[in-house]
Image (cartoon, coloured by chain):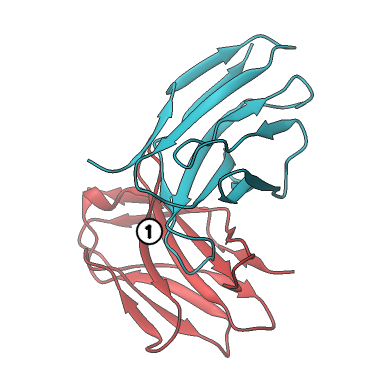
């Protein structure tokens, strides 16, 4: 089955620690995205990648970092510089860059900072 | 800058009654418009989209939305809701060129009452 997997589903972290969220897709999609979802805020774009070895900052990139060394993988690191990291994180992919292409979403990772 | 306004954060409706979820956008250029649905503790799924052509677009599960350029609206409707329609619905807009992003609204939570 083709799709997007995110792991873990729930993640707890102590303040001051970096943590990496996994996102893998086997859809052979070129573009991948990371969003943050907070209650009543909708989705906000953190980073996106149009192609392997390339990525751009979204609207709220501060305190986050990404890499895109393989087409199927786009991990997100939440660093200690992110002041309010507790949120639901969603990864998505599309066949090619361009907003007319449907974005397919993973099931999400809920991060809680203790 | 583009923006999306979903006028209602929550909409309660009785089962088998009609529903309308409102969405207005601000943009001075041609747009692409989307409705995504998020079931509890899941990622988002594309429900329907308007790219061009007919202003009335339909989904496979009975929802429809109409692009109204003069009113800058893309309201979502269903003539008879089912308990399984309980979810959060997100309206989104994009200019659609290769480098542009999708801007999501804050979401409308649809509560189906028995």
Task: Locate residue B111 relative to residue A109 in the image: left or right.
Answer: left
> Badge 1, how many Cα within 10 Å: few under 14, some, many 20+?
some
Residue plotted at (25% across, 64% down): B17
Residue plotted at (37% across, 38% down): B42
Against B78, is A111 above or below?
A: above
Give the color of chain B as drawn.
red
Give the image location of residue A107, x and y in percent.
39, 36
Quadrant location of the N terminus of chain A in the rendered image: top left
Residue plotted at (66% across, 83% down): B29
Give the image location of residue A71, x and y in percent.
48, 42
Residue B109 in view, yes or no = no
Quadrant location of the C terminus of chain A in the rendered image: top right
Residue plotted at (58% across, 45% down): A40
Q: Which residue is mark 1?
A: B46
- For residue A50, what is the image quadrant? bottom right
Task: Locate residue A86 relative to residue A90 in the image: left or right.
Answer: right
Give the image location of residue B56, x and y in percent.
36, 83
Against B83, is A83 above or below?
A: above
């Amino acid at each position: 089955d083709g799709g997007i997997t995110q792991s873990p589903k729930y993640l707890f972290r102590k303040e001051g620690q970096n943590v990496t969220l996994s996102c893998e897709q086997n859809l052979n999609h070129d573009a991948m995205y990371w969003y943050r979802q907070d209650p009543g805020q909708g989705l906000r774009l953190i980073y996106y990648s149009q192609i392997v070895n390339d990525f751009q900052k979204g609207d709220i990139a501060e305190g986050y970092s990404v890499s895109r060394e393989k087409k199927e993988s786009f991990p997100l690191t939440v660093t200690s510089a992110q002041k309010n990291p507790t949120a639901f994180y969603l990864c998505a992919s599309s066949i090619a860059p361009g907003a007319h292409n449907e974005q397919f979403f993973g099931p999400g990772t809920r991060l809680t900072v203790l | 800058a583009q923006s999306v306004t979903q006028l209602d954060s929550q909409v309660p409706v009785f089962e088998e009654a009609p529903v309308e979820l409102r969405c207005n956008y601000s943009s001075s250029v041609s747009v692409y418009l989307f409705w995504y649905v998020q079931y509890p503790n899941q990622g988002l799924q594309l429900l329907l989209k308007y790219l061009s052509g007919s202003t009335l677009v339909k989904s496979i599960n009975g929802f429809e939305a109409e692009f109204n350029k003069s009113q800058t609206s893309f309201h979502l409707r269903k003539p008879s809701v089912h308990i399984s329609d309980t979810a959060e619905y997100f309206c989104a807009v994009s200019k659609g060129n290769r480098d542009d992003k999708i801007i999501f609204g804050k979401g409308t939570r649809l509560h189906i009452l028995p």
